[in-house]
Image (spheres, coloured by chain):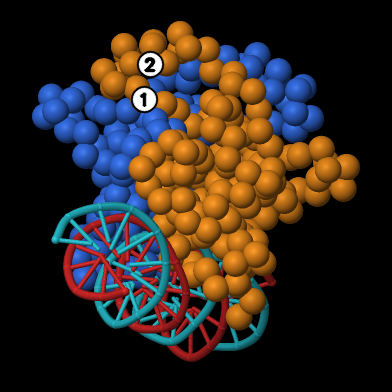
Chain colours: A blue, B orange, C red, D cyan
Amino acid sequence: MTDQTDLRLTPQRMAVLEVLRAAHDHPTAAEVYERVRRTSPRIGSATVYRTLALLVSTGQALELSLGGGAAARYDANTCRHDHAVCESCGRAVDLDHPVPDGMMTEIARRSGFAITGYDLQFRGICPDCQAQGAARPRSGVRPAHSDPLAGNTPAGNTHRKGA
Amino acid sequence: MTDQTDLRLTPQRMAVLEVLRAAHDHPTAAEVYERVRRTSPRIGSATVYRTLALLVSTGQALELSLGGGAAARYDANTCRHDHAVCESCGRAVDLDHPVPDGMMTEIARRSGFAITGYDLQFRGICPDCQAQGAARPRSGVRPAHSDPLAGNTPAGNTHRKGA
DNA sequence: GTACCGAGTGAGAACGAGTCTCAGTATCAC
DNA sequence: GTGATACTGAGACTCGTTCTCACTCGGTAC
C-alpha cells in the first residue's frame, strides 16, 4: 500500500504503520490496536488486524510467532534479522542476521523444499532478568526444549486469566 | 513422567505418548486428541492438553509453533533438530540440526542473553506441492516474509471456518 | 479392610486471539 | 453527479487452549 502499491493510504493505515515504526518492542496486534486508539479512538480491531496483515503481505512489516501459544508480534524492521526472546519477561530483541546463505541452499538441497525464508528465534534469559535472578517462565512462553524434570506439577500452567 | 519421573503412568498418558511417538507428521493438539480418542474414547481434551504440556515440560516432546496463528504442533523426536514448513500444505518435515554451536555462543555474547535454545523453521514449498504447481497459502500459515505485492486483497485470508 | 490424601481425570464453561459479515462511508474514474 | 469499488467499524463468531470442579483412582497409614 502507501508508496509501493495502488492500495489506498487511509488515516487508519497511516496510524497503524506509524505505531509500528515507532515501536521497537515488537508489539502484539492487541498492543498495536491499543496504541493506535490513542490517536484514532474510533478505529476498530478488525481494521488493525486487516492493516497488519496487509503490511505483512506487502513486505512492510514482519509477523513474529514467538511460540508457546503467545500472540503474534509485529516488527516494522523488514531487513532480514532474527530475534532473541526472553523466557522470563517475554521481551524480544533484534539480532543481526546470522544464518549463512549457504545454509539455506544446503537445506533446500537436502529437503527438496523450495526455501523462501526462515524464522530463527533464540530463547534465553535477557540481561535484565538475569540481573533480577529471574527464571520464572512467563505466561505463554514456555520453554520448549527444556530438560527432563522430575516431579513437576502436571500442567506447568502459568495461569493466563484471573478467573 | 513414566520412566523418568515420579509422575503416574496412567493409561491416558500412555495413549497420548504412543500417539505422539507413532506420528511423524507433527500433529496439532487437536489431532492428537482425535487420534487418542480412537483408542480411549472417554478421554477429555483437557487431559490431552495437560498431558502434552507435561510431556513438553519433562522433555519427552517438543512443541512447535509454526507461525501465522496456526495451532501448536507436537513432536516426539526430542533430539535437537529443526523443521521446514510447507507454506502450501502446512506439512512440517524434520531437518538435521544445522545451527553451529559456535553461533549460539556468539549470539549470547553479542546480545547478553543467557541462551537456552532456539527455534529454527525454514519456510518454503515442499516437493509434493511443487509438483502440483501449488502456491496457494494454506489456512493459518501465511507467508510472513513475503515480497512486497501490489494490489493484494486487503486481508489475505484463507478462511479458517466454514461459516 | 478402610479411611484418608493427593494426583489425575472428564466435562464443559470461559477466555483471548483473530476472522467474518455487513451496512455505511470515503474515494476514485468518468 | 453518479456508479463502482475500496475501506471502515461494530460486533458476532470460531478456534485453540486453559480453568474450574466434582469425581475417580492408587498409595499408604492404621
Give the letter of the chain under mark 1. B
Residue A127 coordinates in the image, percent (x, y): 20, 24
Q: Nearer the viewer, mark 1 or mark 2?
A: 1
Residue B7 coordinates in the image, percent (x, y): 37, 47
Q: Nearer the viewer, residue D11 or C1?
A: C1
Is A159 on the left-hand or right-hand side of B34? left
Q: Please tell me the numbered disc located at residue B48.
A: none
Would you name the residue on which mark 2 appears? B107
Whole-number angstrom distance, CA of label 1 to CA of label 2: 11 Å
Q: Is residue D15 above or below residue B29?
A: below
| For the residues bearing labels 1 and 2, Cβ distance under 8 angstroms | no
User: Do circles 1 and 2 both sit on a common chain?
Assistant: yes
Name the kind of residue labelled 2 in the image.
Ile
Q: Secondary structure at mark 2?
A: helix
How many numbered marks appear?
Answer: 2
Give the letter of the chain under mark 2. B
Name the kind of residue labelled 1 in the image.
Thr
Q: Nearer the viewer, residue A39 or A153?
A: A153
Residue depicted at x 35% and y 35%? A149
Would you name the residue on which mark 1 appears? B116
Residue A90 coordinates in the image, percent (x, y): 28, 40
Q: Is residue A30 above or below residue A18?
A: below
Q: Nearer the viewer, residue B102 or A19?
A: B102
Is A135 on the left-hand or right-hand side of C18? left
Where does the C terminus of chain A fall, quadrant-wise? bottom left
Is B125 on the left-hand or right-hand side of B78? right
Q: Nearer the viewer, residue A9 or B88?
A: B88
Which is nearer the N-term, disc 1 or disc 2? 2
Residue depicted at x 45% and y 8%? B102
Could one spot residue B149 in this view of the protein?
Answer: no
Q: For residue B152, which quarter of the picture?
A: bottom right
